[in-house]
Amino acid sequence: MARGIYVSAMTPGSGKSLISLGLADMLQRHADRIGFFRPIVEGTDRDNDPMVRLMQRRFDLSTSNCRGGLTRQELRALLVAGERGEVDARCLAVYSEIAANCDVVIVEGTDLSGHDVALEFDLNARLANNLGAMVMAVVNAQDLGVEEVADAVDVARRELAAAKCDLLAVMVNRAGEDAVDDLRAHVRPGASHRPVYVLPELPEISQPSVSEVARALTARQIAGSRSLERDVTGVKVAAMTVGNFIGQLADGSLVIAPGDRADVMVAALASSFSSEFPVPSGMILTGGLPLEAGILALLAQAPFPVFAVDSDTYAAARDVSNVRGEIATGQPRKVAAALGVWSRYVDEAELLERLELPRPEKTTPLRFLNELIVRARTKRQHIVLPEGLDVRILRAAEILRRRDVCALTLLGPADEVRELAASEGIDLSGITVINPATSGMRDDFAREYQQLRARKGVTFEDAAERMLQGAYFGTMMVKLGRVDGMVSGAAHTTANTIRPALEFIRTRENVQIVSSVFLMLLQDRVLVYGDCAVNPEPDAAQLADIALASAATAEQFGITPRVAMLSYSTGASGKGDSVEKVREATELVRKARPELPVEGPIQYDAAVDASVAASKAPGSTVAGQATVFIFPDLNTGNNTYKAVQQSAGAVAVGPILQGLRKPVNDLSRGCTVDDIVNTVAITAVQAQED
């Protein structure tokens, strides 16, 4: 029977969607099938509710397991008609359909945004009881003193007890960051003696994005950047001279100006092109006034979006002030910030103990990747990203920082990096930026490199020149312990990433070669493929080395290694140099690790399919259930991983380099922001063991 958790706002504006998102992120790592239900949606289309769509996208939930119940309009009509029972019946019917296919269902109640808060509270309490769901109560601490919040928590407990609700936990949300500790100390634990979790208000969530403002004002974009996801950190109304206006401008300000203030438009544009002045998040031109062709041509080059509205400046400023950021828009930066604050302030182990969920049987791609983020957080490492002038790297760095995954250093000309970030609306606060050309570390690194490469005739001048390259500078940071790992390759070749690591980080003891694996995330399990990216024609000893390293990598990421040494032949049926190489490599692996399950030579179908294994390799402890697949050469490995990725819809994470003394990982030049985030998390996990 599915476990239901009803997320119920106890006060208006509680920010309960953050709680729903955090719960879903936690539960999908600890339950095989989760569902999401909003009994009442605020819009006019129950199937197009923003929060429902976010949960579908973020957690790969089907439309049958993630749904809305009634629209606010339908609810109102039923209540006016005195049909409260019909409200309950319809919601219970939808919930039952979801629960039939799920282990746990998150139910997000109403926002208490209607005229009758008491009526809405009663509705949520009654629905929670009728659905048989435990209540997660959310109290809004915004603008309240410590004692007021403590009292609000007590009132919430009493009201839910009076309504005969089963209380799972109380969350205090949107607290002042400097008041979190005081609130924890003053909020009373209640009869259960379980902790009350206190989460701070985050500007990254509450600040609206440019797209949210534009949508709320139905503004027309007329010029400038098409990137609308930048945060609006403040609003500046141009009601003064240009000189005074520029003095008031700050990074992320939304500029509101009458459509005939060409001087303000040009000044804001000039400010955005100067590294010494701030970059606005956007500009709204009021009054519906037509722009001169020359001014419009200038604004077309703006690194921020420019909008027009028909309302006057006062009305536009008033409307903007009423727009608040919403997690439900699904912007990656807001979602990352929400999940980051959840991970920092909620003890998931304690909360899961209350739920007593059965252990999940499957490892889905989403579960594996989220567990990866959680593991990276447990012992925060410091990762360097040498390609600081790649926008994808900057976006990934912001998400990693907001999710609190690890400490980060970017390499590149600091002014250019920060100017690029500002022009793209990317927040790099809390992230170190180092310019190798001007860093005081460069000479120290050059001397170290010269000493390490003295036998190659490297001079200090040569070494100093080499340290201007981001990959060399970053790898030396890893070598000398200034950071714990490096991720590079978004804008450079694999050789560019690996070469410096081979030169002075070198391989681990008893490891012959650096190799790579891909983690292949299938729908219900994770497989390890090696080597698919580095070694073209490994000999038998190198192939054994790759197998041993790949088994160790599997163990590092929680995968029980059962190694299949792949060939075009299974067992003793085949002949030829290629088969003999695999056979010899298999014996070397057995000799090095007698306890490790390994089979070879074996064909892929016999390694992965139990029915084929029964006829081709009966009695094998690996056949039919292999988790680590070692390909005989790079051509086979690279083509196979790509074929599985495309035909089976597998998520390929990697390449992950293995065999080095310290973690350095390579990116594909076609990598996405998500690929970078995952690779950095993998590197952080590798660094934890080092």
Image (tube, grey):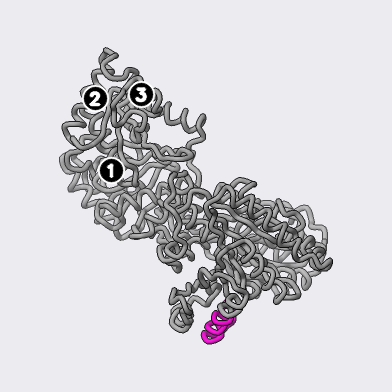
Q: Is residue 688 above or below residue 537?
A: below
Q: Is residue 208 visible?
A: no
Is 685 magenta? The answer is no
Question: Could you tell me the amino acid type at mark 3?
Answer: Ala
Q: Nearer the viewer, mark 2 or mark 1?
A: 2
Q: Is residue 311 above or below residue 507?
A: below
Q: Look at mark 3 in the image and give the residue it sits on.
A: 614
SS assignment at label 3: helix
Nearest to the observer: residue 232 or residue 134: 134
Q: How many marks?
A: 3
Estimate how packed mark 3 is, as few (under 14), some (14 to 19) or many (20 or more) residues with alpha carbons within 10 Å. Answer: some
Segment tinted magenta in the rendering: 141-155
Nearest to the observer: residue 221 or residue 370: 370
Q: Look at mark 2 in the image and give the residue it sits on.
A: 539
Residue at the spot x=50%, y=71% of the render?
A: 199
Question: Could you tell me the amino acid type at mark 2?
Answer: Asp
Q: Is residue 126 visible?
A: yes
Q: Is residue 72 above or below residue 578?
A: below
Label drawn at residue 501: 1
Estimate how packed mark 1 is, as few (under 14), some (14 to 19) or many (20 or more) residues with alpha carbons within 10 Å. Answer: many
SS assignment at label 2: loop
Label drawn at residue 403: none
Q: CA distance from mark 3 to mark 1?
A: 44 Å
Q: CA distance from mark 2 to mark 3?
A: 30 Å
**Residue 618, position in %: x, y?**
31, 23
